Every structure is written in structure tokens, then in C-alpha cells.
């Protein structure tokens, strides 16, 4: 049975066919986050700290760390990214005790992260381009770490799933040339947006099965890619993740956190409610308000995607006896109602005379 071992200083995460789904938290990444990018360039790591703690609290078992900031003061990532990656890895592993995924397209940043990471991190990533294979696979061998293999090469990302499978197979075979076993390769078959390609879901499910059955490798993906550009993305993600798990996918790089409702949205909703003539208590706090109107929470908490994953773990017998499902969903009994059944009646359903 294929198992990929990822470790922090004292904690082990196992990615495997017979293991609970591995959630790799994606939030520590400045791509598309201008505020975080500006903070990192200024040496402010407060958001990184918050994101690390929130993702682990929500259930992430591995944290992805990406230092891909294009500095305004120096646009050369080969110079700026390695020292920033070093700082971020040291900071995050000092805050949380989960394994890390070192994420960069800059080989120098990958090695800088490997040099300071404790345990056995996951390296993200290698692709099928020959120059990339020659740069990254020696690092994988030198540090004895597992690596994410992305199914694209010099020709780009193919829409043909057979081509993407062939690229994955090539990477696994080239890794073997370096003495890297297949169980240390986690293939990303590349999830296409379902809004742009109607067969995207079917393609990735078929690919994952082939990768498992023919190459014997674990798999991952950028889970939110499937819903890109569509309304109610969480609804699509919530369906996609259990279906991918059923096809054999063993991990995903994703956001495990439902982000807090921002004050601006709360103020907008309060004005809307007041305009409708709804009278609320003057002392109603924001958390009660957003809960009442189904807006979410003012606090970071586990997202609906985590609920879908935990349910799928239970249904595939990767949550023995449902212990994790029960632990994360059971609410304390209301005072005075312990032992009561439906409707609060002692003893539950009445027996007919």
C-alpha cells in the first residue's frame, strides 16, 4: 500500500490510500493577495502567523508555505525569495507542529526552505520539463523528501488527460533514475475549471484512478481550481472533494478555513435589515447577528469543505468508528436535557400502551 511520509519535528502526516484525506493548507501564499505581499516585503509576518494558526485549528494536516513575492524594491525572485522562504519556514514551524510543504518555482528558495525545515517536508514542486527535473530531483534525493509532481511539461498544460498521464509517468520514471521511489512522488494531475471544460471533473477522476492503479502513486490537486469563475464555488468544491476521494485522490492543496465575515458586509446587512423595518435588540452583537442571518461567523473557523472531507473519510472507513466526525460535530447537551430524547422528553420516543 503506497504511503508518503511527511514529518515535522515531532508530528507525522501520512498520505495514503488507506489513510484519512490529507489537507494541505494553502493560505500562506502571497499570490493574488496584495495586502499579504506588501506585508511580507515590509517584514510584517502577522498575517502569516494568523493563517498558520487558523488553518491548523480548522483541520489542516500539512501547511503549504509559498514566499513568491515580487518585491517592488527588487523584482528578482532568485535574490529575494530564498531569504524570505527561510524566515517564513522558521516562523511557521515555531508556531505550529504540523509538517510543511515548501512551495516555490525558484530552486534556490526550495533549497533554502529545505535547509531550515525540521523533519521531512513535502517539496512543491517538480514538472516534466527536463531542466526542471535536473534542478529539483537532485534536491529531493539529497534531502530525502517527497515531492509534488505536476503533470505539465515544455508543451504546457494539455487538455488531453492521456498526455497529462504520460507526463506524470515520465516524472516517476526520471525520479527512479535518481533513486527516488514512487511512494515519494505525489502527482498533481491538474484540475481544470469545470466552467471552461465540461469534462474537467470526469477527466480528473479517471486520471486519479489510472495514477493509483498503473503508477501506484498518491495524488493531490489545487482543489478550488474546479470551481474557478463560477457562483457558489463552495457548493461545487463540496461535491468535488468527496468524489475525487472516491476516485482515489489522497490529498489536496486547499483552504480549510471559512474566512470571517468582514465588518463592511455586516454593516451593509444591518442597513438592509433596518431598511426592511426589522427591529432587532440594540445590544445584539455582530456574531449573533451574522449567525441569525446565515452569513457565517465573525471568527475564522473550519469551512464546509472540511465538513465534506470528514464525512467522506467516515464513509470510506478512513475514520474508524466515526471518531473524528463525532468529535468535530458533537455539541454539548443543553443543561437539564442530558439523557432526553426527541423533543426533550425523558426516555425518547414513547412506547404505545
Image: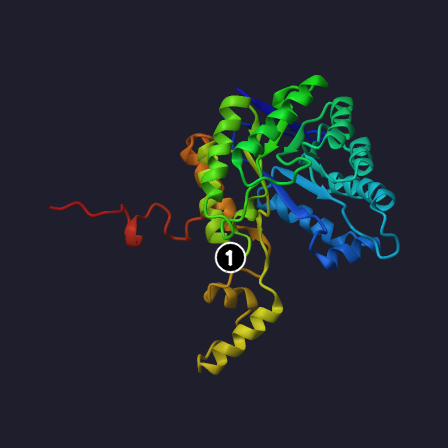
Image position of 8 (left or right of 337): right
- Residue 107: which quarter of the image? top right
Figure quadrant of residue 347: top left
Horizontally, residue 301 falls left or right of residue 106, namely left
Classify mark 1: helix, strand or loop: loop
Q: From the viewer's perspective, is 51 left or right of 340?
A: right
Count of numbered circles in the view: 1
In this view of the protein, which residue sits in the foreground, 43 or 167?
167
- Foreground pick, 294 / 34: 34
Few, some or many C-alpha atoms within 10 Å of disc 1 (few <14, some 14-19, many ≥20)?
few
At 61% across and 30% down in the image, what residue appears?
A: 167
Q: Which residue is most to the front?
A: 155
Q: Residue at x 73, y 23 (%)?
A: 144
Q: Position of residue 51 (x, y in %)?
A: 67, 50
Q: Is residue 14 visible?
A: no
Tell me where residue 34 appears, x and y as whole percent: 73, 59
Determine whether 288 is above or below 21 in the image: below
Residue 97's place in the image compared with 237, above or below, is above
Please indicate, yes or no, whether residue 287 appears anywhere in the rendered image. Answer: yes
Residue 1 in the image: above or below residue 189: above
Q: Which residue is mark 1?
A: 230
Please tell me which residue is depicted at 53% across the width and 49% down the height of the picture. 193
Amino acid at each position: 500500500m503506497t504511503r508518503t511520509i511527511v514529518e515535522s519535528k515531532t508530528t507525522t502526516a501520512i498520505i495514503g490510500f488507506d489513510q484519512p484525506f490529507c489537507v494541505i493548507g494553502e493560505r500562506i501564499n502571497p499570490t493574488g493577495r496584495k495586502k499579504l505581499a506588501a506585508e511580507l516585503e515590509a517584514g510584517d509576518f502577522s498575517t502569516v502567523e494568523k493563517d498558520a494558526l487558523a488553518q491548523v485549528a480548522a483541520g489542516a494536516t500539512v501547511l503549504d508555505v509559498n514566499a513568491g513575492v515580487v518585491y517592488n524594491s527588487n523584482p528578482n525572485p532568485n535574490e529575494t525569495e530564498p531569504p524570505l522562504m527561510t524566515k517564513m519556514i522558521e516562523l511557521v514551524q515555531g508556531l505550529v507542529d504540523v509538517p510543511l510543504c515548501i512551495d516555490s518555482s525558484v530552486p534556490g528558495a526550495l533549497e533554502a526552505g529545505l535547509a531550515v525545515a525540521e523533519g521531512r517536508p513535502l517539496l512543491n514542486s517538480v514538472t516534466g520539463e527536463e531542466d526542471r527535473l535536473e534542478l529539483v530531483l537532485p534536491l529531493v534525493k539529497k534531502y530525502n523528501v517527497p515531492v509534488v509532481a505536476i503533470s505539465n511539461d515544455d508543451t504546457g498544460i494539455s487538455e488531453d488527460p492521456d498526455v497529462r498521464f504520460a507526463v506524470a509517468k515520465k516524472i516517476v520514471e526520471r525520479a527512479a533514475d535518481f533513486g527516488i521511489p514512487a511512494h515519494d512522488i505525489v502527482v498533481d494531475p491538474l484540475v481544470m475549471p469545470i466552467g471552461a471544460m465540461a469534462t474537467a471533473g470526469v477527466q480528473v477522476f479517471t486520471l486519479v484512478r489510472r495514477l493509483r492503479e498503473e503508477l501506484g502513486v498518491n495524488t493531490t490537486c489545487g482543489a478550488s481550481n474546479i470551481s474557478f469563475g463560477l457562483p457558489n464555488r463552495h457548493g461545487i468544491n463540496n461535491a468535488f472533494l468527496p468524489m475525487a476521494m472516491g476516485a482515489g485522490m489522497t490529498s489536496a492543496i486547499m483552504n480549510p478555513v471559512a474566512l470571517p465575515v468582514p465588518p463592511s458586509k455586516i454593516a451593509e446587512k444591518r442597513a438592509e435589515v433596518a431598511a426592511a423595518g426589522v427591529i432587532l435588540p440594540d445590544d445584539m452583537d455582530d456574531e449573533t447577528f451574522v449567525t441569525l442571518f446565515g452569513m457565517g461567523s465573525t471568527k475564522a473557523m473550519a469551512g464546509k469543505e472540511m465538513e465534506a472531507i470528514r464525512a467522506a473519510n467516515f464513509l470510506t472507513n478512513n475514520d474508524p468508528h466515526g471518531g473524528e466526525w463525532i468529535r468535530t460535530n458533537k455539541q454539548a447537551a443543553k443543561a437539564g436535557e442530558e439523557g432526553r430524547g426527541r423533543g426533550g422528553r425523558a426516555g425518547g420516543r414513547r412506547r404505545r400502551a
